[in-house]
Amino acid sequence: MTVHLRPARDEDAPAVAAVWVSAWRDGHLGHVPDELVAVRTPESFRIRAAAMIARTTVALSDAGITGFVTVSGDEVEQVFVAAPGRGSGVAGALLGEAERQVAAAGHETAWLAVVAGNARARRFYERSGWSDSGPFDYAAPAAGGAVSVPCHRYVKSVVAARG
């Protein structure tokens, strides 16, 4: 699969939300509190995708937007790939771009949160050179506050990515 990365545009928000809702459910159902699943409706993903579009990079293939990554400061906030794009290198390209962005912003280390039960994602990050620095409770944004989600914090030095 040939993939091209580019900054997301406002008109990409619906496609980003569609990838996000499907891929989120694949990696999170059964691993996050029911309270979070209840508030992660398709509409919630549309609202959140539109709000973060300026911090998002999309992966484009012949099929359209097949994945995205969102960076906020030193955090790789979201990395999601549609099912047909998994195993094709899309996630690696997106993660590499996120590492580059974190480094370009002047940070030495990038971090991300992975749901404790998402073994597929955890293996991917470890193969990509990220280290599990231990469990913590992530405050997942939800209407009216946050939901505590058992996660692992993964870190990676991105100093070399600055060049």
Image: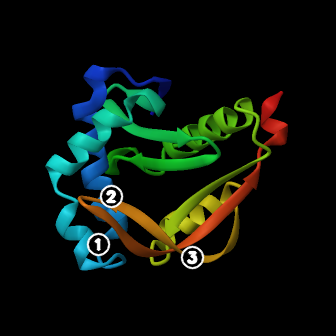
Judge left or right: residue 124 versus residue 53: right
Tag 1, which secondary structure?
loop
**Residue at image coords 67%, 41%:** 99
> Can residue 81 be seen in this snapshot?
yes
Badge 3 is on which residue? 136
In the image, taking residue 89 as reference, residue 139 lies left or right, namely: left
Query: Which disc, if any, is residue 133?
Result: none
- The circle drawn on residue 24 is 2
Callout 3, which amino acid? Answer: Phe
What residue would you read off at disc 1? 29
Q: Secondary structure at mark 2?
A: helix
Q: Position of residue 71 (x, y in %)?
A: 54, 40
Where residue 90 sits in the image (x, y, percent)?
Answer: 49, 40
Which residue type carries mark 2? Trp
Separation of disc 3 and disc 1 at Cα?
A: 19 Å
Name the N-terminal-most of marks 2 and 3: 2
| Left or right: where 83 falls relative to 159 | left
